[in-house]
Amino acid sequence: MWSKAKIVHGDFSEFNLLYHQKRVWVIDVSQAVPREHPMALSLLLRDCEAVHRFFADTWKLEAIPVKQAIFNRVTGYGFGKVSEDEPHVPTDVTAFNEEFEALELEMQRRIDTQKNQFSIDFALGREDDFDERDVALHERESYNDFLTHLSNMNVKSMEHERIPESDESSSEGSEDETEVKTVYEAPSTSTT
């Protein structure tokens, strides 16, 4: 799964293996994560521990590799000062743990860098996404919308300010002329 499908099962146990037609089939991969997932290495190490526990505790088999050796064999990393005789078996578990944690931190740093790069690209836009014609079109459309809004506001204010014609002006026979009455007059200031 690690090398071909590039995923980590995440909940590996003997119940997720089926033997059919002389082949082992892995099932229940709905919770599997890609190798680039921040928890992928921890989940893989837990899966390796489940494999070790099944064969060592349930079947009571001898010479079952420890979880670190299974991890090294699956990934090909060789953490923990491996010997030339057994290239996957770590001779120093502390060194294995340190190298494992360092790789986890490096993967997390890469993921954070990718997230930050996405945020920067998304917020600022990329150079190849920028086109002067789009800006000019947007400004022209915004300006036209603004002018339309102003003219609509002007028409509405004129409708509210219009004073209905009185009976006297309509009886005089001049329908085109409207009488303007002063509703409010500003106080005049006189200088002496």
Image: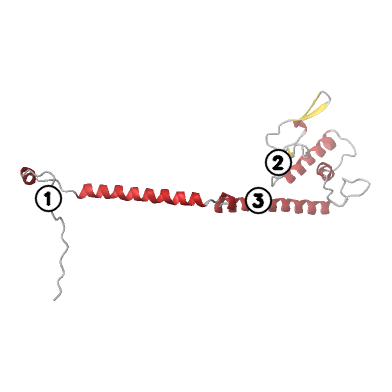
- Amino acid found under the numbered disc labelled 3: Gln
| In this picture, residue 158 sits left or right of residue 150 | left
Name the element at disc 2. strand
Q: Relative to 108, does residue 73 appear above or below in the rendering?
A: above
Residue at the image point whose x is 56% and y is 52% from the top = 125
Residue at the image point whose x is 63% and y is 50% from the top = 115
Name the element at disc 1. loop
Q: Relative to 99, does residue 56 appear above or below in the rendering?
A: above
Residue 102: give x, y in percent of width and height: 76, 54
Pointer 3 local density, CA inside 10 Å: few below 14, some 14–19, many at least 20: few
In the drawing, what numbered circle is on residue 179? 1
Residue 34: give x, y in percent of width and height: 70, 41
Residue 16: give x, y in percent of width and height: 75, 31
Q: Nearer the viewer, mark 3 or mark 1?
A: 1
In the drawing, what numbered circle is on residue 34? 2
Q: Quadrant of residue 31?
A: top right
Check if mark 3's residue and mark 1's residue have beta carbons within 8 Å. Answer: no
Residue at the image point whose x is 84% and y is 42% from the top = 73
Q: Residue furthest bottom?
A: 192
Pointer 2 local density, CA inside 10 Å: few below 14, some 14–19, many at least 20: some
- Amino acid found under the numbered disc labelled 2: Pro
Q: Quadrant of residue 8?
A: top right
- Amino acid found under the numbered disc labelled 1: Glu
Q: Residue furthest right?
A: 85
Query: Which residue matches tag 3?
Result: 114
| In this picture, residue 146 sits left or right of residue 192 | right
